[in-house]
Image (cartoon, grey):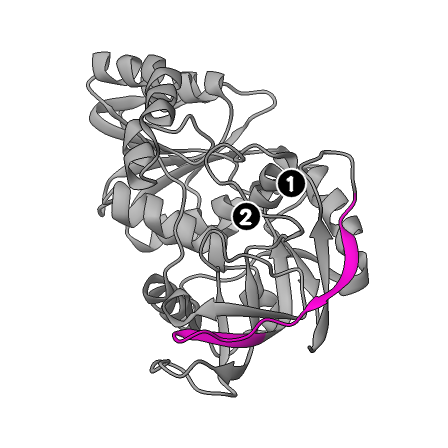
Amino acid sequence: MTQMKAYIINRYNKEDKLQLAEVPQPKAKDHEVIIQIHASSINPLDFKLKHGEFKLFMPYQFPLILGHDFAGTITEIGPKVSLFKVGDEVFGRPADFHIGTFAEYISVHENDIALKPKGISFEEAASFPLVALTAWQAIIEKAHLKKGQKIFIQAGSGGVGTIAIQLAKHLGALVATSTSVANFDLVKGLGADVVIDYKTQDFETILQDYDVVLNSQDDKTLEKSLRILKPGGKVISISGPPDPAYAKELNLSWIFKLIIFLISNKIRNQARKRQVDYSFLFMKASGQQLAEIGNLIESGVIRPVVDQVFSFDQVNEAMDYVSSGRTKGKVVVKVL
């Protein structure tokens, strides 16, 4: 059996480093392709999984290879693959329970990938999938953001924020965001109209009558976000709490549905009293949406924001750097 190098964890834990190991190279099932990974990128979701935050709802098997983004080249296709061929350069976010991009190869369903946008590197392409899909599903699918509406995007210099600002601006919205003073020029360059210094300013006293908030911060910030919305406005949270719609989507057992109902009850009641809508987003893999995002990248509407590129033997250093909270845009790992 052919082996490959991959970074694994053997248990949920905050302190342990990822371990470099030799593991079996994957084989392609009917609708899967094998991709030689050129680059991957790091997301907060990798830390949340590693720490066991989703173990009740998403019980992964060990040893587990982390990593949710990749760009690479197809080396093999399954017998029923129709969308791609060997040699295609692609990028993607593997579906849940099929992750593992901190590795030399991965098998991915053909519906979860798209052709790599022309004119950008593998490293830049690997920075996009998870954050771009998150921004797309929040702003286009859930918020239905329209020209002339106002959106507040928290943490504008982060991975999701840098893409969400560009996407919202492309749709013709007025965009407000929060970041530190050091990142003002960055977010303004991406299209932000109103920039708030989260260290010295309170967005609740500055913003009012907004149509949409993309929340990525804590519960206190989420509650404040409800108060800047106009009636009929929407807050979409990627940091929780999960809502009953999410529990239904995952087809969870009644006990987990009840738990999620209870933990989201307070914020949903507050939203209802203010005549606004609260929803939780846990993004899903979608090659079709990635292809549309790829068109925007190729036409220059959305550009990559890459903070730093680490080599494959520096995966743990890259993880440490992201966990420091100082990154602008995405941190990428060059695998090949």
Residue 102: horizontal and vertical position, in percent?
A: 66, 60
The residues colored magenta run 17-35
Residue type at mark 2?
Answer: Gly
In the rendering, which numbered label is found on residue 159? 2
22 part of magenta stretch: yes
Nearest to the eye among marks 1 and 2: give it: 1
Query: Considering depth in this image, is 212 or 245 the residue closer to the camera?
Result: 245
Classed neighbour count for the residue bearing mark 2: other residues with Cα under 10 Å, few (<14), some (14–19), many (≥20): many
Q: Is residue 191 visible?
A: no
* Quadrant in the picture for the N terminus: bottom right
Residue 26: horizontal and vertical position, in percent?
A: 59, 71
Residue 145, placed above or below residue 207: below
Secondary element type, mark 1 = helix
- The answer to whether residue 144 is left or right of residue 69 is left
Q: Residue at x 55, y 45 (%)?
A: 60
| Residue behind mark 1 | 50
Secondary element type, mark 2 = helix
Q: Residue at x 70, y 39 (%)?
A: 323
Marker count (numbered): 2
Q: Residue at x 58, y 66 (%)?
A: 124
Q: Is residue 35 visible?
A: yes
N-term-proximal mark, 1 vs 2: 1
